[in-house]
Image (spheres, helix red, strand yellow):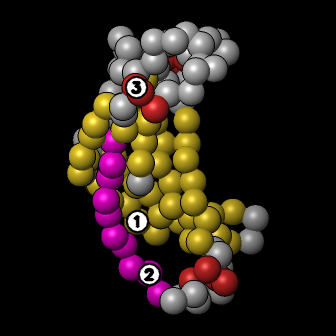
Amino acid sequence: MNVYRDCFSTNSAELDNPAQIGFYVEQTLSYSFIGKLDASLSSSRILDPTNKNPCIIPPRVCVQEGVYTFERTFPIINSSYVVVYQRCCRNNTISNILNPDRQGAAYIVEITPEAQRIL
């Protein structure tokens, strides 16, 4: 899992270490929690500013990438698995969200029954 953040942020939008990852199974109209794990921050780096798009405003942008590597094995089933990572807050430099340092975000991946069968 790769996570990106604004290096210029001055609030609590640091990279989590560890990041808590939750696992769920899709049920009829709901999801059942089946476990979690703490994924350690494998690496982090500041992205090269020379690769920036010249259309980015403001021109001074700093992006940090955090990489989390983890593995979890589940049996193949006829329902979807859902992998979830949730953050408490966003960096305070976002200008198109009110009070971004008080707004969270959730990132999910659905692993469908078809995807489970692909080798």
Whether residues under marks 3 and 2 lie with C-beta atoms below 8 angstroms apart, the answer is no
Quarter holding residue 96: top right
- Residue 35 circle label: 1
Q: Judge whether residue 38 is colored magenta.
A: no
First of labels 3, 1 by sequence position? 1
User: Distance between the Cα atoms at labels 3 and 1?
Assistant: 39 Å
Quadrant housing the N terminus: bottom left
- The residue mark sitting in front, 2 or 1, is 2
User: Distance between the Cα atoms at labels 2 and 1?
Assistant: 11 Å
Q: Which residues are magenta?
A: 66-75
Label 1 crowd (10 A; few <14 / some 14-19 / many >=20) = few
Q: Position of residue 38 (x, y in %)?
A: 29, 54
- The residue mark sitting in front, 3 or 1, is 3
Amino acid on which the number 1 mark rests in the picture? Gly
Amino acid on which the number 2 mark rests in the picture? Phe
User: Distance between the Cα atoms at labels 3 and 2?
Assistant: 40 Å
For the question of whether residue 89 can be seen, the reply is no
Image position of 82 with respect to 17: above or below? below
Whether residues under marks 2 and 1 lie with C-beta atoms below 8 angstroms apart, the answer is no
- Residue 49 circle label: 3
